[in-house]
Amino acid sequence: MKKQLLLLVLMMAFAAVCNAQRVVALHSATGVTVFSGVNPFVDAYTAALPGDTIYLSGGSFANPPLMDKRLLIFGAGYHPSATAVTNPTLLTGAFNLGDNADNLMIQGVQFMAGIHAGNNVPVSSITIKRCRIDGGINFPGTRATPSTNNAFAECVIIGDVNLSNVTNSSFTNSIIENRVLSSHSNSIMNNVFLGVSWAHDGVFRYTDNNAISNNIFINTHHNIIWFGQGNILSNNLFVHYAPHFGGTPVLSGNHLNVPLVNIFVSHTGHTFSYDSNFNLVTPDLFPGTVGGQVGIFGGLFPFKPGGIPQNPHISLRNIAPQTAPDGRLNIEVTVSAQDR
């Protein structure tokens, strides 16, 4: 096992040195298989069996048209500060989930066209962590066969989050630019809601019986929950002085009318920027229900700077401009283990 892991790290380091070669490694019970070529991710997926692990180098990848296997998938990351050596891992197509994708886990990629499940297709116990999701999240349906026990953590989410067919799942320590639609009986903790300009329709729409705690809402319109009942809101922070929480809310420990300038070390406006610093100016003033402060750096699993996934991370690459007198080319690559 140690030899196989070393091979994976060296392979990814070689890809970083080349800075052009897209490489995918399939780690299975029989060993490690390396794919390159035109569609290496698709080829690795085709060869994979449920329970296998796929490692993606930096670069743009066409993804399988349907993700319908229980796999572990690790990319090189998405954040510019953390992928200067490797380039980010980009999945270019719509990421469609099948009902055999239960227990799928993905870290360290940027979804370019959203994450989608079929209408009333149950997809449960998936984990999407330290990813950027452009194009939103879409689980449509009537909860006749709901998706349950899913976890989205430490992500940047651009686009609507439609949870019509999702219950008993969690969204934690993430930055969410748009709305959450039709969330029922989910846990929504330690997020930052940036509040797009049309948030008069509500940050949450048609939202019932959720536990909403330790979040930061910077939208300037009063509608937080529009058409929703029975939500529990605890220790959240609001820019608006009189937010609307829907019908029969249960409220405790919330902070209202907090100027944006007094919240974050550096952030303006209602859109996500890598230049923003979402650390709190005075974290002790805004305690959460668990794990210290409100926002993405509080809670049980604080946001990891740079969104670096838990697999070994390539942080340095130096290549000599020419060979040495003995014909060797000096190459220095630093690979850092991650503790979480």
Image: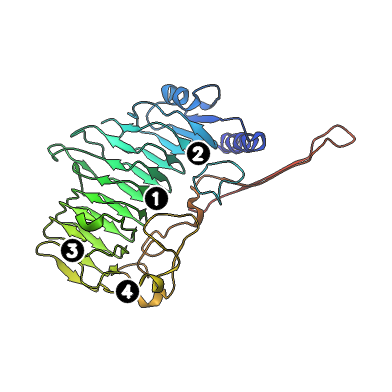
For the N terminus, the image quarter is: top right
Q: Position of residue 153 (x, y in %)?
A: 36, 51
**Going from the N terminus, do you reach mark 1 or mark 2 first?**
2
Say which amino acid is labelled 2: Thr
What crowding class fits label 1: few (fewer than 14 Cα within 10 Å), some (14-19), or many (20 or more)? many
What residue does disc 4 label? 258
**Going from the N terminus, do you reach mark 1 or mark 4 first?**
1
**Going from the N terminus, do you reach mark 1 or mark 3 first?**
1
Gap in angstroms between the C-alphas marked 2 and 4: 37 Å
- Above or below, 283 against 144 in this view is below
Say which amino acid is labelled 4: Val
**Going from the N terminus, do you reach mark 3 or mark 4 first?**
3
Say which amino acid is labelled 3: Ile
What residue does disc 2 label? 89
What residue does disc 1 label? 155
- Above or below, 301 against 7 in this view is below
Check residue 232 in the rendering and tell me which mark sits there, or answer none.
3
Q: Position of residue 89 (x, y in %)?
A: 50, 38
